[in-house]
Image (cartoon, grey):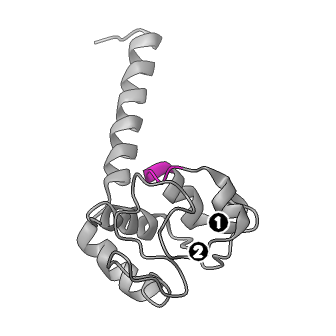
Amino acid sequence: MRRSPATAGMLLINVLLASSSALAAGDPTAGEKVFASHCAVCHTTTSGDNKIGPSLAGIVGSKSGMVPGFDFSAAMKDANVTWDDTNLDKFLANPAGFIHGTKMFVNLPNETDRQNAIAYLNTLKK
């Protein structure tokens, strides 16, 4: 069976989109372990319980610099970023590169760890 270049191109795009969305979904159970080993030193998952970093309860879908009771950097307050999966991925990969002047100095360089952590953050409610 012979396919046109356009059909082959569409097939490739569909495969790439399916594989990237599967990766973006992450594993919340694995993400909870990533959170415990990399994030819990500075962050909690309990609403209103801030540590060195803000509580991350309900962080997905919220705006940057808006967790009550936490003293954010001016850069974070002014960033006007909505914490969706894409922005969380960029921030966790390189916090200072994504929001210049942020106080956060720890990153998650491993893409699988980031996707899993983001999947876990998506399970947290305020």
Q: Quadrant of the N terminus?
A: top left
For marks 1 and 2, the one nearer the N-term is 1
Q: Is residue 111 above or below residue 83?
A: below
Q: Residues within 10 Å of mark 2 (few under 14, many from 20)?
A: some
Q: Residues within 10 Å of mark 1 (few under 14, many from 20)?
A: some
Q: Disc 2 marks which amino acid?
A: Asn
Residue under circle 1? 94
Q: Position of residue 30 (x, y in %)?
A: 29, 74
Residue under circle 2? 107
Q: Classify residue 110 as left or right of residue 45.
A: right
Asked if the residue at tag 2 contacts the one at tag 1, i.e. Cβ–Cβ closer than 8 Å, the answer is yes
How many labels sit on residues?
A: 2
Q: Is residue 3 above or below residue 121?
A: above
Asked if residue 43 is among those painted magenta in the image, a careful observer would answer no
Residue at the right extreme? 101
Q: Secondary structure at mark 1?
A: loop
> Residue 68 bears which disc, if any?
none
Residue visible at 33% across and 72% down?
Answer: 31
Q: Nearer the viewer, residue 117 or 55?
A: 55
Q: Nearer the viewer, residue 6 or 66?
A: 66
Q: Which residues are magenta?
A: 82-86
Residue visible at 57% across and 50% down?
Answer: 81
Asked if residue 85 is among those painted magenta in the image, a careful observer would answer yes
Q: Quadrant of the C terminus?
A: bottom left
Q: Main secondary structure of the magenta part?
A: loop
Mark-to-mark CA distance, 1 and 2: 6 Å
Q: Position of residue 123 (x, y in %)?
A: 26, 63
Q: Position of residue 54 (x, y in %)?
A: 49, 76
Q: Disc 1 marks which amino acid?
A: Asn
Residue visible at 72% across and 62% down?
Answer: 75
